[in-house]
Image: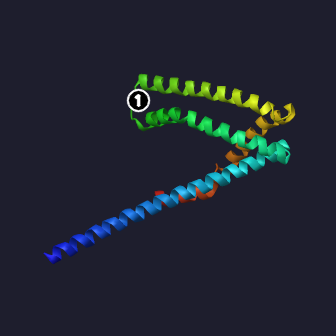
Amino acid sequence: MNKIFIVTFVAISVLFSFDLSAQQNDQKQRNDRNAMREAFEAKRNAFITAEMGLTPEEAAAFIPLCDELRRKKFEVGHECRMYSRGIEKKENPTPEEYTKATDVCTEVAMKEAQLEKEYYERFKKILAPEKLYKYREAEMKFARQLMREGGPRGDEHRREQNRNNNK
């Protein structure tokens, strides 16, 4: 009877340690992703601030609104991304599924345009027209630069993905 208890206890302890280890790894990955996202956002905001020639006061008022707009657009786009991923995962999507995904993504684009309009009205209260114009240019210039560099995570991310895929 004692041996059964000891074996059961050891087995449960081992399983619990695996679960705890997996949870710690998940938390570390989330922390790493959050740190990478925050570094990327800081880089983007610094680039935009410099490109637009914002004063510290303008940046303090403008950048949080930009971040808020991006966050809201990201949230609005969630449904489109989910439908698109669903289509990509299916072997033979039906015409109805393609139509639904396209309709959802079109609706998302309209919501994003409405958000942009709403926030540009708010931006106008903070920035001169010239700087507001430079904002769009700065966003596009940053995106082009990002594409040339290989995305927000660059070569290190690709190397890590290759290492994981080769395991």
Decide if residue 10 is on the left or right side of residue 58: left
Question: Which residue appears farthest toward the left when viewing the image?
Answer: 1
**Which amino acid does the dot numbered 1 rest on?**
Pro
Of 73 and 65, which appears nearest the observer?
A: 65
Q: Residue at x 61, y 36 (%)?
A: 72
Residue that mark 1 sits on: 93
* Coordinates of residue 55 in the picture (x, y in percent): 86, 45
| Secondary element at tag 1 | loop
Of 124 and 154, which appears nearest the observer?
A: 124
Q: Quadrant of residue 63?
A: top right
Q: Quadrant of residue 75?
A: top right
Of 155 and 52, which appears nearest the observer?
A: 52
The answer to whether any part of residue 67 appears in the image is yes
Quadrant holding the C terminus = bottom left
The answer to whether any part of residue 167 appears in the image is no
* Coordinates of residue 152 in the picture (x, y in percent): 64, 50
Answer above or below: position of 27 versus 107: below
* Coordinates of residue 11 in the picture (x, y in percent): 26, 69
Quadrant holding the N terminus = bottom left
Badge 1: few (under 14), some or many (20 or more) residues near its Cα, within 10 Å? few
